[in-house]
Amino acid sequence: MLKNGEDYSIKGKKLIEWLQYGAEMEDDPMCRASNHFHNPYLDWTTSGLSDTLKIVDWWCWGTSPYPPNQIYSNVTWATGFIDRGYIDPYSDVQDFNAWDWESARKYYLAYLTGSDLEVGNNVVVADEQRRNQFLTYTFRALGQLMHLIQDTAVPAHVRNDFSQGHTRYLAERESTWNILKWFGNPFEDYVRRRNKTSWFDKEPDNGDFLDFRITDLWDANILRADTTPDQLSQINMSCLGLAEYTSINFLSMFTMFKTDGDDGPLVFPYPKPEHCVVFMEKPQDVLTNLERQYLANWNGHPGETIYKLAAVGYLKYFRDAYFPNISNEKLPVALDDNCYEEYAQKLIPRAIGYSADLLDYFFRGQLSVTTIPRFNNNTFKDIKLNIQNTTETQESMLDGNFFLLIHYKKENADVFVRADHTPYIGELAYQDSIALSFKFTTVEPIFVEEWKDVTFTLAFQGTMGNEIDAVVGKVFKPEVKDLFIENWENGIDKDKWQNTGDDDDDSTQTAIDGHLIMESNQSSNHDGVSRINSLVKDFTSDGSDGILITQTTYFQFSIPKMESYFGDHPEWANHALLLNFNDDTVIEYSGDGRLHNWTSSDLLIPHVFDPAERITDNIHERFEIGGHPIPDPLYLKSIQFMQLASFDTLNDYYFYMDVDDIRLFDTQWEE
């Protein structure tokens, strides 16, 4: 979207720092975190946090806009979806969360289209600073969404474990005056304290989903309470949402093999105790000579192999020594730093990978743009874009609209103007292209020499894959490489243009107010000699082959008048603008239909144009329309204005041609 986006700064923060800011703000105020839990075994309308504390409920009732009776699951809080394919149209999530997935897209579209949302959708921002505000909102929202994904890499967040899992006393926190910071989740605290580079240097574990939807990053809706080990063993772990992956492979403080009643089933079916074995580990604690025992899940667990799933309590040593007849079915287990270390090695690369997946998905849409600007009186009038869908995921763009915003400066002040209309497209498939024209009736004059300072932003909003209201953006600076330009503002340059016609008073070539005026007239009592009024620009006079014509070379001209008058229809008359090429092919433009086959028909490409229009012609396309092969290479040898009547024309005639300007240019663009 942005060239050198990693270095782009707004209000003193780079975009990555706005992501970080969003990640921090998702926990502010504290009671927002009640919406950061998701139990992947339950329906999403009931999968949010239920393991709350009365004192926390009381606190959130009185101090925050996040009441405990309005708790959402993490995935619904983040996306608005209440199952994998459905957003509840009556949901009030956005009343509480202005930084969810829908909000991020809304802010991004506002940035791309220059809309000032805080004033009104149809109001265009006043300056770049105001516009950039919505880009900061976009990245803040994405940062908050990444926080929510990363929370599902904390076992307590996906196993409904708050009352015990998030209220442990953390001695290292005593350095802060805020008592609330003294308590928290031991795994999160371990990661903060250690912050090992090795965790973050590992290759990220990205998702690998089928028929992907944004909610799959949280919950791909694969896990069920009755999912058997055999069924799970057939599933690639990367096909699971992060909440599913974390819940089936790891334990949290208060849900270690927890059952529903004394003899009831496990509240969380995985990991299962029967899949675990006990093994010995030499102690790292020098204060004791006891060997520490750990549970490993390598006895049939269908997911990740975790060697230190849980630590066996030290009392087991004494129980085995003095009470060997006591059953080992319910071992006293806990989680220690060795467990958290292995958890971090598995969970952090996956949290990073899934966070990257979210960013990649948000910005996955790609457009390639070539530009064909139109200028009138040397000022910008409108622009034609050739838009290609280059999205690497090969998704089509469906049922949506394109928006185009122009940004330029006048007297050092920002000017933003949206195109007059937003064309609708039914489908733009991967690698397909579409040509769309955009007019800007409220744009102040932009001269050709100012074109290098113009920036366009193209936006698409519509369906991509399984995402409705997807947003795609493309910022580009069009640049026109002028190959030849003439506007006769300084008269007719005799060094550039040669008069190759008759040198008499009946044929004239004059420059008036930046226009070339060519006239040729003859009375009926003429001498029977044909008359030619011709002005030529020869591009080979310097010994070169002429001007190289590529697939992106355009010829643009404005001839407001090309008129001819005859006492009787002549047998042979020609009134045209001619382009002569290296294979002797001639493109002949006529504004009054006075085309004449003065050369071999096999080499002539005629075209009658409307003098009321400014003509912009792609030369390669004109060859194709005329059914002529395009030589390789193709060179333009000369441009010629011609008025010709043969000696067989015995009646009065009068030719008049008013040429505003002509331009030969190549379209180029910067990504």
Image: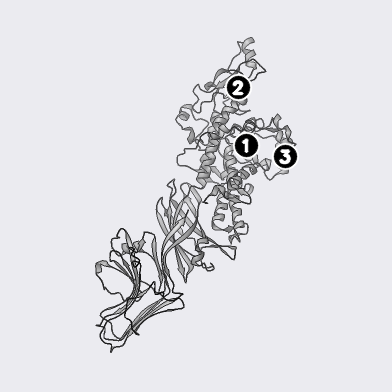
Quadrant hosting residue 201: top right
Q: Residue furthest bottom?
A: 525
Q: Real-space Cα distance between discs 1 and 3?
A: 16 Å
Q: Real-space Cα distance between discs 1 and 2?
A: 26 Å
Helix, strand, or loop for circle 2?
strand
* Residue with the mark numbered 1: 49
* Relative to 165, residue 514 above or below: below
1 or 2: mark nearer the eye? 2
* Residue with the mark numbered 3: 59
Which kind of residue does numbered mark 1 sit on?
Leu
Q: Position of residue 165 (x, y in %)?
A: 65, 31
Residue at horizontal 60 percent and vertical 22 percent from the top: 311
Q: Position of residue 669 (x, y in %)?
A: 46, 57
* Relative to 238, residue 629 above or below: below
Quadrant hosting residue 652: bottom left
Dots 3 and 2: beta carbons under 8 Å?
no
Disc 1 packing (10 Å; few <14; some 14–19; many ≥20) = many
* Residue with the mark numbered 2: 311
Closest to the observer: 380 or 412?
A: 412
| Residue 191 seen in this snapshot | yes
Upstream in sequence: badge 1 or badge 2: 1
Helix, strand, or loop for circle 3?
helix
Residue 472 placement, left or right of 99: left
Closest to the observer: 583 or 545?
A: 545
Q: Position of residue 7 (x, y in %)?
A: 56, 48
Quadrant hosting residue 558: bottom left
